[in-house]
Image (spheres, rainbow, N blue to C red):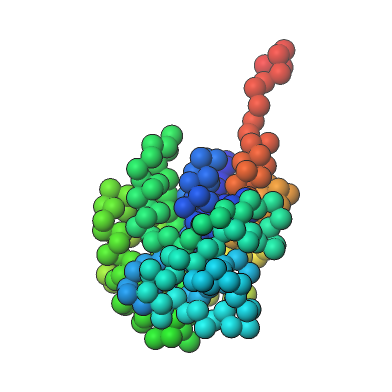
Amino acid sequence: MPLPEIHGHRGCRGLLPENTLPGFLHALALGVDALEMDVVLSADGQVVVSHEPWLSAAICLDPTGQAINPARERDFNLFRLPYATIRACDCGQRGHPVFPLQKSQTGAFKPLLREVLAAAETKRWPVPPRYSIELKSSPAGDGVYHPAPAAFAAAVLAVLQLFEAALWRVTLMSFDARILRAVRQQAPHLATCLLSEDGRPWLASIAGLGFVPTTFGPDYQSVQPAAVRELRRRHPGLRLVPWTVNEPVAMRRLAALGVDGLTTDYPDRAMAALQSLRPGPPTPGTL
């Protein structure tokens, strides 16, 4: 059984600030198979790499370099800010309170999607990297934190067209089925991933999408043998890439269940955990 791919969650969030150029390049240097990232839109229509569509008080400073009141972080709505203002906000020097091993990076900012792709594609890697790009969208956020699905998908696809040679290595992901339907309509050749966290049965979630995506991405804690068997029986060609698994024991359990990839904040841990599953050379005299 082949070992699963390693997808670096927001780059390598456990080691360097999330969704930043240093984090992505370090993840690639470690040897991840894919970079996982999130995108939103700025007021001037730029595709920005960010998990929240606002400045997170836990990791970012405001444009003047001051701490952000957690109760007011949503006032810094990226969809209402020009990218020049967003770029001026440091999102690396504070570190992350949940990831004590993370090394802070003064001056780390929220990059544009095209900057991340350009930086990754400019360098030569042993294997060309894949890109798993999540569009952060919800029905309640339409017109507030992002445009409607068709416009959001079109903006991201316009950036991807600048990197035509890498399109076959891109998967567009979302928890929002509307976004994936828009992507399928506008770019039916592009790989898609339905993300799931609502506790619904896997097959019901896929049926609700209206088509079978390239990949299914559930919470790793929902990955149980019976669910995997049923998924493989009903959709044998569907890739299974759960998120976000950080403990070696869980990584090895997922590998034993035959997942196609795993998304992790700690690619270094995943590589060590999976390496331990590789068959070693035969012991002399045992052949």
Drawn side of residue 259 relative to residue 225, left or right: left
Q: Can you say whether 280 is above or below 109 in the image?
A: above
Q: Can you say whether 215 is above or below 147 in the image?
A: above
* Location of residue 53 in the rendering, given as x and y in whole percent from the top left corner: 48, 75
Q: Quadrant of the N terminus?
A: top right
| Residue 211 seen in the current view | no
| Residue 73 seen in the current view | yes
Q: Can you say whether 19 is above or below 141 in the image?
A: above
* Location of residue 4 in the rendering, given as x and y in whole percent from the top left corner: 56, 46
Q: Nearest the camera: 245 or 191?
A: 245
Residue situated furthest top in the rendering: 285
Q: Nearest the camera: 127 or 145?
A: 145
Residue at x-position 57% and y-position 79%: 73
Drawn side of residue 219 relative to residue 112, left or right: right
Label total for image: 0
Q: Quadrant of the C terminus?
A: top right
Residue at x-position 64% and y-position 36%: 275
Residue at x-position 66% and y-position 39%: 272
Residue situated furthest front in the rendering: 64
Residue at x-position 46% and y-position 63%: 110
* Location of residue 248 in the rendering, given as x and y in whole percent from the top left corner: 71, 48
* Location of residue 173 in the rendering, given as x and y in whole percent from the top left corner: 44, 65
The image quadrant of residue 93 is bottom right
Q: Nearest the camera: 196 or 108?
A: 108
Drawn side of residue 52 relative to residue 82, left or right: right
